Amino acid sequence: MAVRCSGGIWRVVSSALSATLLAGFLLVGGVAERPGPTAPGELPPSKPVVGSTYLCTGYAGCKNAGYSDAGYSNANDRMYWRMYAGHNCTNYAAYRMIKAGMPDERPWAGGGNATYWGQYMDDVTDQRPAVGAIAWWRAHDGGVGSSGHVAYVEQVVSETEIVISEDSWGGDFHWRRITKDSGRWPTGFIHFVDKSLRNTKAPTVSGTPKVGETLTVDTGAWDPDPSFEIQWLSGGKPIDGATTRQFTPTGAQQGTVLSVRVTAKKKGYDPTVVTSAPTGRVARGELVVAEPPAVTGETMVDEAVAAAPPTVSPRPDAVRYQWRADGLVIDGANDETLTLTDDLVGKQISVTTVATKEGYANQRVTSDRVGPVLIGEIELTEPFTVRGKARVGQELEVTDGRFRPDDADVAYQWLRDGEPIDGAATTSYVLTGDDLGTTVSVQVALSRRNYADRVETVTAGEVTTVPTADLRATGKSRKAVVVVTLQALGVSEVHGTVTIRVGGREVVAELTDGRARAVVAGLQPGERTVRMTYGGRGPVRTAKATTTVRVLR
């Protein structure tokens, strides 16, 4: 069945519509849309619908969404201005007027149907929306039925957009947003007690919408002159603490659009709220460098230089570092300090800093170059030498040289054919069979902070061995039998030939397993001297030996 808001009741008229249809909607002409969820106390943006946009439904639903019923849910069991109690547009409107200070007596004589309100009160009815006024629909205007409709004006967004609260017989309580072009605009506004401030020039925002740039709101022109409450909005939502005429966007607002909600207030007048047009999207800010970074410290090898950070406004959230040598990036050098190494000698050092802050473009700055990087040289004033013979079993010893600065550290390493000998890192070394035939040397390394290492290599020479000889001779008739045995450290057996001389006779014999036998014949009887000469072979040095033999007749 259809219902109409009339003189205290929604009078029932003949219709085939289902009562179920009326349970959740106030049919103010056309199809209404149920409200979606909103944050408490905030009005969602308008959406074009056939009719109007519901912001909340029901006493409890509206309360939970942050919209008030001005206490009507606890007082709707009473009749006001002789309107029927409960869900009823006229009883709710009368309640709001009484609550605003009017007496509990209908201010006109005649019928109470909503359609009559603006007719009987035409002296205070016009086309100007105002907070606290009664929005009035004449019968059949704006899609309402034959009894008309009334509602309370909660907010005037602009001259073409309002927010109302309303109740309805057989329906429910709502807050609703209406635009003038929706076809649901009221016939007029009844100004029983409200005194509204008139905005003759809308608020405007001046300045560049950019992080770090100050914006200013002009509150517009009003009649009469009021005081103002300011609230800056980002994407339509209030910005905490942004309640003055000037506002500087931060990184949190970058990429959003800003607007300003101006609430005009004056004693004896209802507050009026107007929102400025939105700005463009807030652009990234620019960090300003007052002083570039600088490199401090001594540019000597082994020393650490430090980066003095740049002076940047506003203060950045973080500063990153990248060290450079002759303008080229040093891989992995991203700390605030840099220890100078040998490979940087002769190069100039600088540091690039990147300052970052939310909502701002990164600011990259490079310091002036310092340097070049220097390194000292250790001077050798007297050379190192090696004392001892390069023979297996002999001990070699380093004789220290002289150098400047004289507090440099000295390290030793003995080498065999240029390769380090395991465990041979002291000032002396005893030659072994492993060294035979090789060149043994010692490497002397000088080191000191801020100086280049100096390495000197002193050669002891090729390592040899001297054989020992066992010479034995046996006399025979006019001849001598001579046996020679040669042994040497570092070799298992001595090879080569030996020369045997006895009484002017000479015989050459081949060593086999370090032993040679020679028979010297044609000798005169008597005591004779036997001489053996070994000419050496490879690292085995020469050897000589003598003995005597008695030659028989």
Image (cartoon, helix red, strand yellow):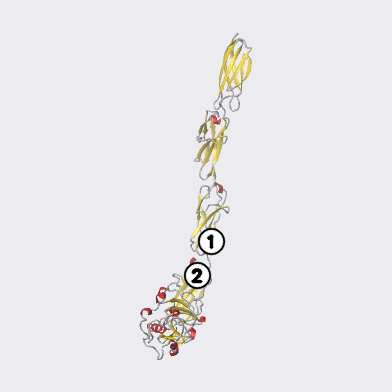
Q: Amino acid at mark 1?
A: Gln
Left or right: 322 in relation to 196: right
The residue sitting at 63% across, 15% down in the picture is 505
- Is residue 191 in sight in this rendering? no
Check contact, mark 2 vs mark 1: CB within 8 A.
Answer: no
| Between 32 and 528, the one nearer to me in the picture | 32
Kindly identify which residue carries mark 2: 214
Q: Secondary structure at mark 2?
A: loop
State whether residue 9 is above or below residue 492. below
Q: Identify the residue under disc 1.
A: 363
Relative height, residue 442 to residue 304 (above, below): above
Query: Where in the figure is residue 364, as x and y percent of width and height?
Result: 54, 59
Provide residue 488's location: percent of width, then percent of height. 55, 25
As drawn, which residue projects farthest toward the top?
553
The image quadrant where one finds the N terminus is bottom left
Q: Residues within 10 Å of mark 1 (few under 14, many from 20)?
A: some
Total marks placed: 2
Taking 158 as reference, is 552 left or right?
right
Amino acid at the residue labelled 2:
Thr
**Badge 2 density bin: few <14, some 14–19, many ≥20, Cα 10 Å:** some
Q: Nearer the viewer, residue 387 or 503?
A: 503
Q: Which mark is residue 66?
A: none
Query: Where 464 sits versus 24, above or below?
Result: above
Q: Is residue 45 visible?
A: yes
Q: Quadrant of the C terminus?
A: top right
SS at mark 1 in the image: strand
Of 157 and 90, the residue lying toward us: 90
Name the residue at the front extreme: 16
Q: Whole-Å distance between the Cαs marked 2 and 1?
A: 20 Å
Considering depth in this image, is 84 or 183 the residue closer to the camera? Answer: 84
- Residue 107 in percent (x, y) is at 39, 89
